[in-house]
Amino acid sequence: MDGSDNAHHGPQDRLAEALAPDMAAVNAIIRARMASEHAPRIPEVTAHLIEAGGKRIRPMLVLAAAHICGYPARNPGGEDHQKLAATVEFIHTATLLHDDVVDESAQRRGRPTANLLWDNKSSVLVGDYLFARAFQLMVEPGSLRVLDILANASATIAEGEVLQLTAARDLATTEDTYIRVVRGKTAALFSAATESGAEIAGATPDQVRALYTYGDALGIAFQIADDLLDYGGTSAVIGKNTGDDFRERKLTLPLIKAVAKADAEEQAFWTRVIAKGDQHEGDLEIALSLMERHGALAAARADALTWAATARAALAPLPDHPLRAILGDLADFVVSRIA
Amino acid sequence: MDGSDNAHHGPQDRLAEALAPDMAAVNAIIRARMASEHAPRIPEVTAHLIEAGGKRIRPMLVLAAAHICGYPARNPGGEDHQKLAATVEFIHTATLLHDDVVDESAQRRGRPTANLLWDNKSSVLVGDYLFARAFQLMVEPGSLRVLDILANASATIAEGEVLQLTAARDLATTEDTYIRVVRGKTAALFSAATESGAEIAGATPDQVRALYTYGDALGIAFQIADDLLDYGGTSAVIGKNTGDDFRERKLTLPLIKAVAKADAEEQAFWTRVIAKGDQHEGDLEIALSLMERHGALAAARADALTWAATARAALAPLPDHPLRAILGDLADFVVSRIA
């Protein structure tokens, strides 16, 4: 479990190495619970999503939080942390499937193919199936507190997704709304992972709260960094994938900050390209120069670093543990991409 | 609570009258929990579905089961039965929203309007929101058994919906598969309603099992009757809405029974109209005559009556209660449409 000799790897690799035996068990649970005797199409649809090597950060957060708080050391042979790890991965996969429906619809401008429609059906129903499987799994450890945590996370996720839909293209979107959307999109499942891991380990209320705060801040830092990278990070150099959010007229933090400081002429520009969607060649460059002018990219970067520092600091009240050190490094790592 | 002077009403009306005060409380819970401070679109989308007077049979089943088993008589002021009633209505509404995505896609033959796409997004995400709200509500009574019941019902529902998708147009569909689909579509939430109502009331295991069996059999009887009516009931008179399932190539019980007895020539007919979907004027009449020839409609009707009798008989071990009598009548009522 000591990752110190692997310091040349990133913290995610060190986490994966430290948790490899646990993750093998989690993968076995996932495969077993994905199966449907009567509807073999279900594992077909989910397998590529679950098997095809996502980073598995969410289940690893559950496992790390549980280990740091003494599980299963105090309950030898306990598998509840593995069941919860599989649970959050199922919930994550289900939200990806449902996001597909939402995103694909938008991209194809009202003319989906028959194949896309079949995918829509499968995405909705198989997503529901994974939610239901997650629900069955999470009941098994018999902890009402854990169920409460996951129920509240589900509501935050769903509300955030609806909010993202209604806030899209709305220049009046505030930073507060943005943070709510980000909690729904990323941070709520991160914090539910770490909080429920602590809870299942029988951690003290202070430790549970600390791991909630860690997961929440980690998720927000990660998502702000991601949104910043969509504008090329802080360098404002236009790369291959720069500007996707701009073209999709998403109100992410750099844009919200620039709009908040816009004069009348700039306001007219934002109204044209974001509210009305009337975009021409060169508009992305103008948007970036306005963000630079108002220090929007630097300010968004500073916010991300503050959230990462909050995540790291939250770990202080937890027992000393090699995994605690890795989680601390992970907080720095998620913002290292925009350093 | 005595419905005897209202015997001229149908059992659903008598149920609604007996449970009116409870249902007012359930409606208040539904309105309160549907609200989203930050995403006002959510109640917009759900209000017409929930408010527009469905029969509310599912929440009434929860309440009736709880009352018959002595709740809240033994826990004065208890509201857990009302919370569970709101829970099942939320789950039902969420499945309706997700069904919309699946059904609309099929109907419009690959060319949905922009409006339909917006509806698809809203349907998926607001459906997820209602599931999450249901999840929060069902945790509140603090009964792990109830959570287990609802988790299993959710899995049965989701698996049944996927199965329905994959079994569509498949002439090899068996009666066993049909019953699985029907459980997912209707009976699983009926039985979860009655079982969880009994459980929350602290009923004996025998009573809990009895109310599970009642809900399961009631749901199956109801759905078979519904599928039979789509072929005009037992009279085989073609009415305005006759044949929708035939045109959509759904493998419902009358069709499955006729296919099972088909000779080579009939098999070729079914392959053309159902498997290949090559339907012409007069084909519905041919289908009906084949069903008549093999007694498929009469046999499906007999099955529905058997399930209704099972439902009524299941009530025997329960305490004598006016609501028990109404539930018994309800079992007969759901098949009276095909009498």
Image (cartoon, coloured by chain):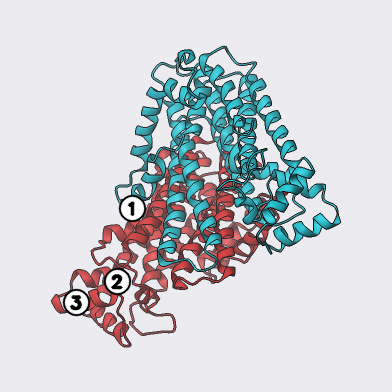
Chain colours: A cyan, B red
Residue B60 visible: no
- The residue that mark 2 highlights is B254
- The residue that mark 1 highlights is A41
Number of callouts:
3
Q: Secondary structure at mark 2?
A: helix
**Which amino acid, by three-letter code, is at mark 3?**
Ala
Q: Is residue A70 above or below residue A240?
A: above
Mark 2 or 1, closer to the camera: 1
Q: Residue at x 41, y 71 (%)?
A: B336
Residue B200 visible: yes
Q: Is residue B163 above or below residue A15?
A: below
Question: What is the x, y in percent for residue A268?
Answer: 80, 60
Q: Pointer 2: residues within 10 angstroms few (<14), some, or many (20+)? A: many
**Which amino acid, by three-letter code, is at mark 1?**
Arg
- The residue that mark 3 highlights is B268
Chain ID of residue with mark 2: B
Q: Pointer 1: residues within 10 angstroms few (<14), some, or many (20+)? A: some
Q: Earlier in the sequence, mark 2 or mark 3?
A: 2
Q: Nearer the viewer, residue A182 or B87?
A: A182
